Amino acid sequence: MSIPPLSNALQTKSELPIHKYKKEILDAIDASQVIIISNETGSGKSTQVPQFIIEDGCEKNKKTRIICTQPRRIAATSIAKRISEERNEHIGGTVGYQIRFDRCVNKTTNLTLTSSGFLLRCLTTSKPENLYQNITHLILDEVHEREQTTDFLFILAKEAIKWHPNLKIILMSATMDCKKFDDYFGGCPIINVPGRLFDVDILYLNDIIVNTEFENNAMDALISNQNELLLNVIKRIHTKEPTHQSILVFLPGYDDIMAQKRQIETKSEMENYQIFILHSGNLDQSRVFNPMSNGIRKIILSTNIAETSVTIEDVVHVIDAGKAKEKQYDPLTESSGLILKSISKACAKQRAGCAGRTQNGYAYRLYSLQQYEEMEEYTLPEIQRIPLTEICLKTKILAPYISIENFLNKGLEPPPRENIRQSIELLKKIDALDTDERLTYLGNHLINMPVDSQLGKMILYSIALQCIDPVVTIVSGISHQDPFVLSFDQTNQQEEATETTDEIRKEFISPIHVILFAGPAHLSHTILSKLDSSGNDINALTDDNTTRFNLNDDWTSFNHMSFQPDIDELKMLETLCNFIKEEDEVEKRKKIEKFQLKKDSISMDTIENFFNEPNVMWK
C-alpha cells in the first residue's frame, strides 16, 4: 500500500507537547499489541498520533491502514479535516472520514476517522475477520467517555488481538483510569504525556461572583438563578475582553440552550455578537469553526458534544454549568429516561481544556470548589445504565456460540446481571431470539434496522397488515424526542415558524401527536428512505459486500420469519390506525372499517402465507 509522503506540515506541530514523545510512542507500538496514551487536554494526541504512524509507515515502507474512532460525528469529521490541512492534502486522500450517511474516503485511504457506533455497525454487518485483516492499527480515542459502543469494542478488541497478532490497538484519553485499562488488557505500556501548550485559569463560583462586581444583596439571587448568573458572566466577558476571543458555554440540553439564547437576545443589551449552537439535532454544525469578521464575538451554546476532540481555535472563555443529561434505565419499572445529573471530574477537566487549545484561556465553573470535590471521578459507563437489547442482538451476531451474559461479562465493567436478563427476555418475547438465545430470522432483520427492536418489529408487522404509513409515522414519533428541525438562525420566516412550533407544542402532549398532526404520508416517506439507505456506506471500511436491510427487497426475504401476532398486538395496530388524521372523514371511516374487516380475518397461517404470496392476502 503506497503512502504519499508528508509535505509542508505546519510548524506548530513540533511545538505540541506530544511531539517530544513520538519515538517513545512508535517504539511502544512496535513492541506491544496494545498501548495506552494518557495526556493533558490539548497536547495534540488526536491529530498527531495517527500521523506518527503514517509517517513511520512511509519511512519504513510498511503497509499502514488505520481506523480511528471518535465518540461523536463532529469530532470525526473535524479531526479528519484538521489532519488533512496539516498534511497539506485534500480530505478524502490519505486521510478521510466515514460516518453514517456521510463519507469522504477512497480505496487508498490510509487513515479513516469514524464514530465508534459506525465501526460497531460495520463489524456486525460483515465478517469481523475481513476488517481486522485489512487494517493494521485501531485507535480508540476519548475512551474515558465509556459509551456502550466503546465498551463493546473493548471486548471485541481484546478478542481480536488473540487471533490477529499484527493488529495494534491504541487507547487514548486525557482523563482515563489507566490502571483499570492496563489490568483489563493484561498489562501494556502506558505513555503519560504531561503538559499542554497553553494554560487555563479556572475560576469557581465564589471567584465568579466577586469578578462580576455585584453588590452583596444581589449575590443570593444570582446564585439561585443560574441562567441570570450565566448571562452576567457572558456580559462581563463581552464588555471587558477583546471580541476575537470566543465564548463556549456548556449546558445540559436543548431546552437550556434555547432558554439561554432568549436570555442573551432579550436581556443582555449586548451588540456585535453571533450565537452558534452545538447540539446533536443541529444539522449545520460546521459553521461554528469559521472565523468571525472583525468586531463580532462568537458565543457558542453547546451540550457535551463539544467536550472532546473538537478544537474551535478562537475559544478562550469556557463557561461550565456543571450539569449534563444522562440516559438512565430502571430495571424495576423497565423504563428509561434522561436524568439531569452533575458531571464528573473527568468531564469538568475536558471542558476546561477547550479553552486552552490555541492560546491561554479561562474556565468559569458555575459551581463551588466544594461541589467539584464531591463529584464522581469518572462518569458511570453507559452500558451500566441503559437498556441492552441492541447490544444483546449484536452479541449474537459476533459471538453466536456463547451466551449473551457470558460475553458481556468479558467487558471492562460488565452491566448489571438483571439488565442483561431483562433484555434477553424482552428479545425472546418479541421473537428476536428463540428459547436457546439463537437469533431468529426476525432478529437478523431487526439488527439492521436503525430503531429499537420493538419498533422495528412494529414496522415489519405493518408491512404484513398494510398499514405501514401510520406505523412508520408512529415509530418516527417514538424514536425522536422532537420532530422539528433545529434551525437557530432566526430570519423573519423562521421566527414565525418558531412561534407556530411553540403553539403546536402547547396543544399536543407529545412529539408523536405533533407528527400525526403534521401528516403521516410525507414523514413516512422520509423515514422509509432513511431505513432503505441506512446501510449504504457500511462496506467502505471492509471492502466486501454486506447484507443490507431494504424494505423494497423481494418479499421472499421474509419467508422464514416466525411471526406470532397475538390479539393484543393486532388491537394495538388498530388503535394506531385510528390515530391517523385524514382530511376526508369519509375516507378515514372507510380505512378503519376496511382494517377492521381484514383484522377479523387474520390468523397466524394467513400472516405466514402473506410473506410467500403478499398480493393474495389483500385482494
Image (spheres, helix red, strand yellow):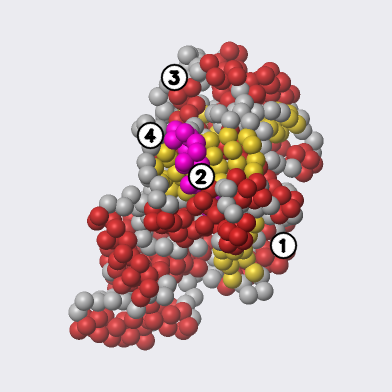
Q: Nearer the viewer, mark 3 or mark 4?
A: 4
Please rate how many residues cluster around mark 4, counting C-alpha atoms within 10 Å: few if below 14, some from 14 to 19, many from 20. Answer: few
As shown in the figure, which amino acid type bears the numbered disc 2? Answer: Arg
Considering only order in the chain, which callout, 1 or 2, is on the residue closer to the N terminus? 2
Q: Say left or right for 255 vs 219.
A: left
Residue hosting label 1: 416
Inter-mark Cα distance, 2 to 1? 47 Å
Task: Assign the C terminus to one quadrant of the image.
Answer: bottom left
Q: Position of residue 428 (x, y in %)?
A: 59, 69
- Image position, residue 509 (x, y; %): 41, 75
Q: Amino acid at mark 1?
A: Pro
To which residue does mark 4 refer?
295
Numbered badge on residue 88: 3
Mark linked to residue 236: 2
Q: Residue at x 46, y 84 (%)?
A: 567
Going by the numbered disc 4, the residue's amino acid type is Gly
The mark closer to the camera, 3 or 2, is 2
Tell me which amino acid carries mark 3: Asn
